[in-house]
Image (cartoon, rainbow, N blue to C red):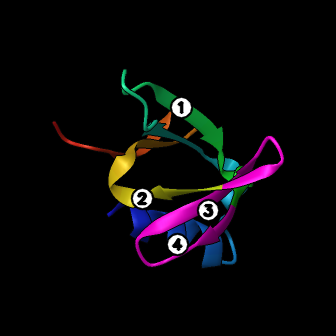
Amino acid sequence: MAKRILDELKWHPAKSLSEVEITYVHRSPRGDEVTISGEEIIALEKSFFVVHRGGQETRIPYHRIKEIRRGDEVLYRKRG
């Protein structure tokens, strides 16, 4: 579901990834959450999306996405 929403934002002519913020679970012992701008996404691949931050690329699996927001509107929220 999260991948479908990101694909739509990337490819729909009237929408844009830069409009959203994505919150995902960071792979750390504490399981911290990180929120990024859709502008930081440089690729959407089959099982993960690629983010460019701090001069490096990071691959994040879609299943780690907790929420996708456009302003106050929640486009996706992971259950559980």
x and y, in percent, of residue 29 in the image:
36, 25
- Which amino acid, by three-letter code, is at mark 4? Glu
User: From which residue to which does the magenta span run?
Assistant: 42-57
Q: Which mark is nearer the camera, 3 or 4?
A: 3
Q: Position of residue 23 (x, y in %)?
A: 49, 37
Q: Is residue 50 magenta?
A: yes
Tell me if I can see residue 35 in this picture: yes
The amino acid type of the residue labelled 3 equals Val
Which residue: 76% across, 51% down? 56
Against 35, residue 48 (above or below) is below
Q: Real-space Cα distance between discs 4 and 1?
A: 22 Å
Q: Tell me if mark 2 has few (under 14), some (14-19) or many (20+) residues whose alpha carbon lies within 10 angstroms of its own.
A: some
In this view, the residue farthest toward the left is 80
Mostly what secondary structure, the magenta segment?
Answer: strand
Which residue does the numbered mark 1 point to in the structure image?
34
Distance (Cα) linking label 1 and label 3: 14 Å
Q: Residue at x 40, y 59 (%)?
A: 62
- Pointer 4 residue: 8
Give the label on residue 42, or none: none
Q: Give SS at disc 1.
A: strand
Q: CA distance from mark 3 to mark 4?
A: 16 Å
At which x and y percent is residue 50? 61, 62
Q: Of the residues under marks 4 and 1, which one precedes in the sequence?
A: 4
Q: Earlier in the sequence, mark 1 or mark 3?
A: 1
Q: Which residue is mark 3?
A: 50
- C-alpha separation, residue under disc 3 versus residue under disc 2: 9 Å
Q: Find residue 61 and name its label.
A: 2
Q: In this orientation, does residue 12 appear?
A: no
Residue 52 shown in magenta: yes
**How far apart are the two marked residues, 1 and 2, measured between alpha carbons?**
13 Å
Q: Is disc 4 placed on a helix, strand or loop? A: helix
